Image (spheres, grey):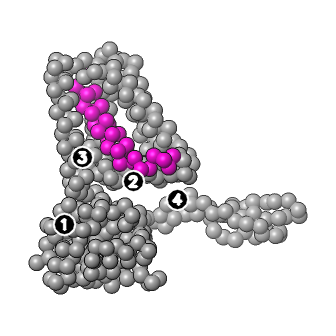
């Protein structure tokens, strides 16, 4: 039992540190995922949405700290109890998401490792078993050093987490796992390879046959049945290949300008997924850097999910000498974790990506 408990201790500790550290690298992204869970059609907790970033930061720092404390053997009773409560909650959450197909990616490992809902649930079940072994065998969890060393290690780790979180919040994630990272070509990311798997759908056809309802299930073909058609329900039973970049458009007046914009040699994108939530300080910084970019021969465009009732007043208020185009909010949130944020592109390839705090670093020479 002693060896099993200590093996579980190592596995759980490392997994919690890795999972927490990946999300700590991108707490804004994790907060977007929490907002999905808080939505009315999922957990129906919309009053928590304004606090999503704070909750995200608390959870990811706690996750890292519990992993470190477990490996150090510091405050083992508190650590094991906290791990158990956390994994019970997350196991319920991933089961709920998988069973009701509410949130298709739990965000357990951020954008670094994508898991399906049932894969996420299975992972949490395994962790639950390992943590139960720790719970019932916690007498075998011995400190690696004296309580004083354990306390110092815990405090140092907490301080490092806070400093790292402060850095990525005021700049951008240190490691970008998304398809819009620097060096990526957006057009290439939208390509579907030849022979890629296609989605498979199941169709439930409902007919009225001699006064009674009859349901016939097919994979697409209209069934041969002597009855009156009532309705059909469509269900995706197997996902097809989805390119890394999807739902990417640059629309204005009902027309998509994405292809033309991505062909530009010198393009600056100003990303503001929601102008109501955009940082006023960040918006003020845009005037100087975009004016210089325009003077240096760059085409500058704004991209937002906000309509003209917000974009036109914003242009006027901040003196912005460029137009805004419409792009889906989720896509814009994925492109850059800053509102507003700035991208420099050459023929669709991202050369520079900046948080508004680093706007002055935009290289347009």
Magenta-drawn stretch, dominant element (helix, strand or loop) = helix
Please name which of the two marks, 2 or 4, marks the residue nearer to the observer: 2
Please report whichever mark, 4 or 1, sits nearer to the chain's N-terminal start.
4
Q: Position of residue 33 (x, y in %)?
A: 41, 51
Q: Quadrant of residue 152?
A: top left
Secondary structure beneath dot 4 equals: strand
Dot in front, 4 or 1? 1
Image disc number at residue 359: 1
Residue 238 vs residue 142, the one in the foreground = 142
SS for callout 1: helix
Q: Which residue is mark 2?
A: 32
Q: Is residue 170 left or right of residue 233?
A: left
Label 3: element kind: helix
For the residues marked 2 and 4, what is the alpha-carbon distance in whole angstroms?
Answer: 26 Å
Q: Residues within 10 Å of mark 4 (few under 14, many from 20)?
A: few
Q: CA distance from mark 4 to mark 1?
A: 43 Å
In the rendered view, would you say 273 is above or below 48?
A: below
């Amino acid at each position: 039992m002693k060896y099993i408990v200590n093996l579980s201790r190592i596995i759980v500790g490392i997994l919690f540190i890795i999972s927490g550290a990946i999300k700590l690298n991108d707490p804004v992204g994790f907060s977007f995922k929490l907002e999905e869970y808080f939505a009315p059609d999922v957990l129906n907790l919309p009053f928590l949405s304004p606090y999503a970033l704070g909750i995200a930061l608390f959870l990811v720092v706690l996750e890292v700290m519990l992993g470190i404390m477990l490996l150090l053997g510091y405050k083992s009773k508190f650590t094991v109890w906290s791990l158990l409560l956390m994994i019970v909650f997350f196991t319920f959450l991933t089961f709920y998401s998988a069973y009701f197909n509410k949130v298709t990616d739990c965000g357990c490992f951020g954008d670094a490792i994508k898991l399906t809902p049932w894969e996420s649930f299975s992972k949490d079940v395994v962790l639950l078993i390992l943590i139960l072994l720790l719970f019932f065998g916690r007498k075998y969890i011995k400190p690696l050093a004296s309580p004083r060393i354990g306390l110092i290690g815990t405090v140092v780790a907490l301080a490092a987490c806070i400093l790292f979180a402060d850095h990525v919040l005021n700049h951008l994630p240190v490691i970008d796992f998304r398809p819009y990272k620097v060096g990526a070509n957006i057009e290439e990311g939208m390509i579907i390879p030849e022979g890629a798997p296609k989605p498979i759908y199941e169709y439930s056809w409902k007919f009225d046959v001699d006064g009674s309802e009859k349901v016939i299930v097919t994979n697409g073909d209209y069934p041969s049945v002597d009855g009156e058609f009532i309705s059909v329900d469509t269900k995706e039973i197997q996902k097809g290949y989805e390119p890394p970049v999807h739902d990417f458009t640059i629309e204005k007046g009902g027309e998509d300008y994405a292809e033309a914009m991505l062909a530009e040699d010198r393009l600056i994108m100003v990303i503001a997924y929601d102008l109501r939530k955009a940082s006023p300080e960040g918006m003020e910084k845009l005037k100087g850097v975009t004016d210089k970019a325009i003077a240096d021969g760059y085409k500058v465009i704004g991209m937002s999910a906000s309509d003209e009732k917000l974009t036109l007043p914003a242009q006027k208020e901040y003196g912005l000498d460029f137009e805004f185009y419409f792009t889906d909010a989720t896509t814009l949130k994925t492109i850059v974790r800053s509102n507003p944020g700035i991208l420099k592109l050459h023929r669709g390839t991202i050369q520079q990506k900046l948080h508004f705090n680093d706007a002055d670093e935009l290289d347009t020479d």
